[in-house]
Image (cartoon, rainbow, N blue to C red):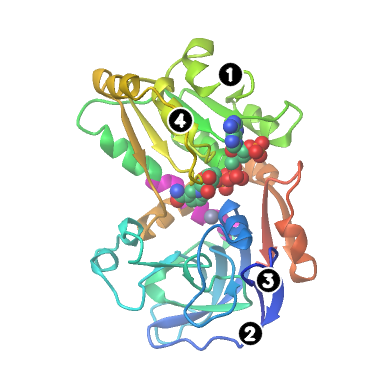
Amino acid sequence: MKAIAVEPGAGEPALVERPRPEPEPGEALVRTLRVGIDGTDHEVIAGHHGNLPAGADRLVLGHEAVGVVEEPNGTELDAGEFVVPTVRRPPGRSNEFFERGEPDMAPEGEYFERGIVGAHGFMAEYFTSPAEYLVSIPPELAELGFLVEPISITEKAIEHAVATRSAFDWTPETALVLGNGPLGLLTLAMFESVLDIDRTYCLGRRDRSHPTVELVEDLGATYVDSRETPVSEIPDAHEAVDLVYEATGHAKHAFETVDALSPNGVGVLLGVPEPWEFEVDGGRLHRELVLHNKALLGTVNSHRGHFEAAIDTLSQLPEWFTDELVTGVYGLDDYTAAFKDGDDIVKTAVEFDAP
Ligand code: NDP
Ligand code: ZN
């Protein structure tokens, strides 16, 4: 079968031949339909993130997949059922996090991530997976099933952010998304269409003609250009917000988030920056968090429950939005186009088989 893999140092993915996998007991064989590409894939390709499976010389990419069960192999799944795989797997042996169904809370070393850390991904014509890591998706959503994984990241982030405010009466009316990449835009759409937050803002650094800025405004949000209005000036230029969702990976935004929050607000950080030293007024930051009951938290990955919530969310996102967000789906004969960066490219996927 054909697979898309990257060799360390190659700097770009390649189409390779691999044997079709045989499901072990408890695993199903899945025929891959589509696999989405995100910033993490580009970091893996560049060699900045992730590592190879033991003994392998290259990594099959892909962690945002949707497929169809080819061989249930005695599991409770049915042949022909559409499924989305979760990403984390036990690192050889299971551990308490997987046993509790909370692999997203496992510390480094206690998990593999398919297509990223120590395990091959889903960019192949077929993959196998234990049935417990395959989440059923309705046929009418299969075409966009590769958006379930990134949406699940935000399902978890919102769950954790809301949990930090659960000790008192907290109803967010305003929210700010930092970043107009695919994750930021999906989150903004969730704030607008699913959570029904009154006023939303989205920060980027592109001119108004950029398609993502149009998407932000079409969603009903206010676009903030960070070149004109830095995050800490948003309260003066617009208003302080109850919820900040950071999806830029720009390390200063972690601290500026505290300034953008209204009293009792919460900031949730998703970005994964490289080390970067800069000055911050730590005293002011500390005081601001304490005297205004603010919270700041980080979150990574997601578990099965977040995937289930994400499938429900996907069904509620407006069709015009997903049409604009997904700028290209490419077959294997043109897969390199899916990895290109460009002004008119927002979210792409590789198609192994038509949904
Ligand atoms: P992208 O890199 O596609 O998006 C980042 C966006 O932020 C880009 O649109 C970029 O704009 C914008 N941006 C960066 N710096 C600034 C700035 N100073 N001012 C304004 N805008 C800025 O990534 P994704 O959307 O896929 O993901 C967002 C972040 O979340 C990434 O850091 C990624 O690594 C992380 N991530 C974290 C996960 C988790 O579980 N915690 C899961 C998935 C992703 P421009 O294009 O103009 O540079
Ligand atoms: Zn992803």
* Horizontal side of residue 197 vs 351, given as left or right: left
Q: Which of pointers 4 and 2 lies earlier in the amino acid sequence?
A: 2
Residue at the image point whose x is 53% and y is 35% from the top: 188
Q: Residue furthest right?
A: 333
* Residue type for callout 3: Phe
Q: Is residue 2 above or below residue 50?
A: below
Q: Name the residue under label 3.
A: 352
154 in the magenta segment: yes
Q: Nearer the viewer, mark 4 or mark 3?
A: 3
* Residue type for callout 1: Thr
Q: Mark 4 points at which residue?
A: 196
Query: In the image shown, does 192 or 39 lie closer to the viewer?
Result: 39
Packing grade of label 3 (10 A; few <14, some 14-19, many >=20) is: many
Q: Name the residue under label 2.
A: 18
Q: Which of marks 1 and 3 is in front?
A: 1
Distance from Cα at disc 2 to Cα at disc 1: 50 Å
* Horizontal side of residue 281 vs 246, given as left or right: left
Q: Is residue 145 above or below residue 207?
A: below
Distance from Cα at disc 3 to Cα at disc 2: 14 Å
Q: Is the C-beta separation of discs 1 and 3 under 8 Å?
A: no
Distance from Cα at disc 4 to Cα at disc 3: 36 Å
